[in-house]
Image (cartoon, helix red, strand yellow):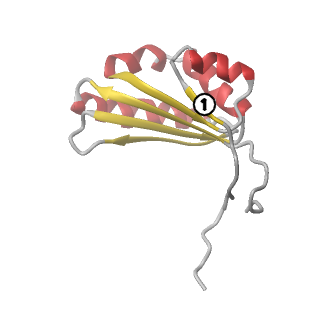
Amino acid sequence: MSDLNAQSDRMVLIIGCSVKNTNKFKKWSKDRAAKYVYDLKEQNSISYEWHLSEDGTEATLIELFVDSDGMMERLGNHMASPLATEVFEQVDITSVLCLGNAKPDAIEALSAWGAKFSNHHCGYNRSEVVIAR
């Protein structure tokens, strides 16, 4: 657990998408994309999660990284993978939000997708659940 308001290098990448075909997307995201990224075993990747709206027309990818360098490793691996073209067969990207202290290379890479950026300000981070008193 970090102290309250301690400096954090953690990065959160949130990508909003419009789904082209719900059934195909569900299969692709679960059986292809998530498995592919999981199998890369990227050291500084904490999580990779797709979320789907109730009607299946909108999807949100949320990725969490140890730091900006970990996020850049993920982006580099993505661009070198078959997923880089496959994703556009499944969705149209509607928004990109990058939370945390992104380094210049990350800002440059994500700006090409029209990303918005917010730097870490304050808070805390727990690695385990705190039991209520």
Q: Could you tell whether 62 is left or right of 98 in the image?
A: left
Farthest-out residue, bottom: 133
Circle 1 sits on which residue?
A: 117
Q: Residue at x 33, y 17 (%)?
A: 89
- Horizontal placement of 128 versus 25: left or right? right
Looking at the image, which residue is at 41% across and 31% down?
16
Viewer-nearest residue: 73 or 110? 110
| Quadrant of the frame with the N terminus | bottom right
User: Is 49 left, or right, of 52 in this rendering?
Assistant: right
Rendered residue at 40%/37% (across/down):
60
Report the residue at 70% width, 30% height from top. 102
* Quadrant of the rendered image containing residue 115: top right
- How many marks overall? 1
Q: Is residue 94 above or below residue 129?
A: above
In this view, the residue in front, 31 or 83, is: 83
- Residue type, mark 1 in image: Phe
- Please state the horizontal and vertical placement of residue 15, each as a whole percent of the image: 46, 31
Q: Position of residue 94 (x, y in %)?
A: 39, 24
Q: Position of residue 75 (x, y in %)?
A: 60, 23
The image quarter in which residue 104 lies: top right
Q: Secondary structure at mark 1?
A: strand
Q: Residues within 10 Å of mark 1 (few under 14, many from 20)?
A: some
Relative height, residue 13 to residue 84 (above, below): below
